[in-house]
Image (cartoon, rainbow, N blue to C red):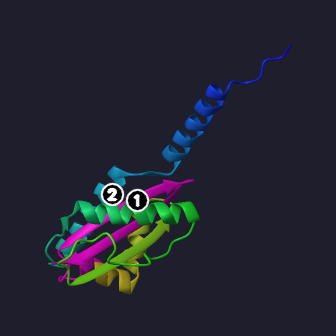
Amino acid sequence: MRITESPRRSVLAVAVVALVSLMLAACQPEAENANVAAINQLRANVSVPALSRVGELDAKARAQADRMAKRGSIFHSVNMGAGVSAGWSIIGENVASAGSIEAAEAALEASPPHYENLTNPAFNQVGVGVTVKNGVYYVVQVFVSR
């Protein structure tokens, strides 16, 4: 008589695979912190006030970074204002993918429309989301003026 794998063992295997998948495509708080610091350093270099980091904007940016990583391509949010509480007057979003957070930031700074968002003195809040999947950093920066 041969005993087959128990359903409990199968559930455990699925849970382990799901956990590993999450680890492979996980948000990167260290990279996010480094990116916010790089943004504010760039702004200081051009005499523009630093941005305040806002949790709801981080959540919006992380969700978009996760969507991009899942799809394997970059694209903008369908509804820029979704997930942002009332009271904002201007909103902007930068998206990028690269082999490192530094390379993604360099690409954004080299692009005139993205650089404009990074250095726009009207923006006073930021949220950053970074998801890494298969060695690719998916980066989203959300800018708001309140």
Q: Tell me which corner region of the image, top left, top right, bottom left or bottom right, holds residue 110.
A: bottom left
Residue 142 seen: yes
Residue 96 coordinates in the image, percent (x, y)? 45, 71
Which amino acid lies under the numbered mark 2 shown in the image of this protein? Answer: Glu
How many dots with numbers? Answer: 2
Residue 48 coordinates in the image, percent (x, y)? 15, 78
Q: Tell me which corner region of the image, top left, top right, bottom left or bottom right, holds residue 21.
A: top right
Residue 28 coordinates in the image, percent (x, y)? 39, 52
Q: Is residue 39 above or below residue 117?
A: above
Residue placed most toward the observer, 47 or 51? 51
Residue 38 seen: no
The reply, left or right, for residue 57 in relation to residue 68 is left
Label at residue 32: 2
Q: Tell me which corner region of the image, top left, top right, bottom left or bottom right, holds residue 56.
A: bottom left
The quarter of the picture where the N terminus appears is: top right
Q: Is residue 17 above or below residue 111?
A: above
The reply, left or right, for residue 134 in relation to residue 31 is right
Residue at position x 24%, y 80% in the image = 119
Near mark 2 (Cα within 10 A), the count class, few <14, some 14-19 or many ≥20, is many
Do residues under tags 2 and 1 come within 8 Å of each other at their CB atoms? yes
Label at residue 130: 1
Near mark 1 (Cα within 10 A), the count class, few <14, some 14-19 or many ≥20, is many
Identify the magenta region.
Answer: 118-146
Q: Earlier in the sequence, mark 2 or mark 1?
A: 2
